[in-house]
Image (spheres, rainbow, N blue to C red):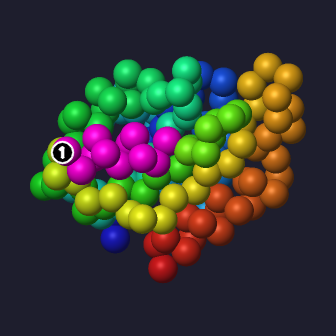
Amino acid sequence: MTTAIRYYTQTGNTKKLADAIAEATGVKAEDVSVPLNGYTDVLFLGSSVYAAGIDPKVREFISTLKPENVGKVVCFSTAALLPSTYRQVSGLLKKQGVAVSEKEFHCRGRFLQVHKDRPNAQDIEAVKQFAEEVLK
């Protein structure tokens, strides 16, 4: 099974999760500026909430995905206030005809003085377990 990890971050929170998934799966985590090459069975896609939405760079990356090059996308995200980016990201992926896992991982992320310790060690361990379970 082929796996890829792509993420976008402005503050480093989502990168922490992507790096933890990389450690758990043995796959290099790369920014959404790096296109997928060939077919990928499972794509872990990380994003964050900025001003109640996802960054245009994530939208642009999603626009490059096709059912022919991705088996399914598994979402992970961070946000200081909103519950996750799943609804926005999955909606865009479905418009592209790309399958989206109902499983997602989300945790709080630090923003200014809010959630100063997040993602924390528990979040990192939880996302590693999440990635391992997805790939079983």
Q: Is residue 111 magenta?
A: no
Q: Residue 95 versus residue 5: which sits nearer the camera?
A: 95
Quadrant where the N terminus is found in the figure: bottom left
Q: Where does the image place residue 16, in percent across and percent down from the top left?
A: 67, 41
What amino acid is labelled 1 in the image?
Gln
In the rendered view, does 46 fall on the left or right side of 57?
right
Position above or below: 45 against 59: below
In the displayed structure, does residue 32 sit left or right of residue 21? left
SS at mark 1?
loop
Residue beneath the point at 33% across and 58% down: 100
Residue 82 picture location, percent across and down: 62, 38
Quarter of the image for residue 72 reads bottom left
Per the picture, the main secondary structure of the magenta-coloured stretch is helix
Is residue 63 shown left or right of residue 83? left
Total count of labels: 1
Q: Is residue 21 visible?
A: no
Q: Which residue is mark 1?
A: 96
What residue sits 57% from the left and 71% below the top? 132
Q: For this rendering, which residue is in front, 23 or 6?
A: 6
Q: The magenta stretch spans which residues?
A: 85-95
- Residue 37 position, x and y percent, is 24, 44
Could you tell me if residue 136 is visible in this image? yes
Q: Quadrant for residue 55, please give it.
A: top left
Look at the image and say whether residue 94 sits in the magenta stretch.
Answer: yes
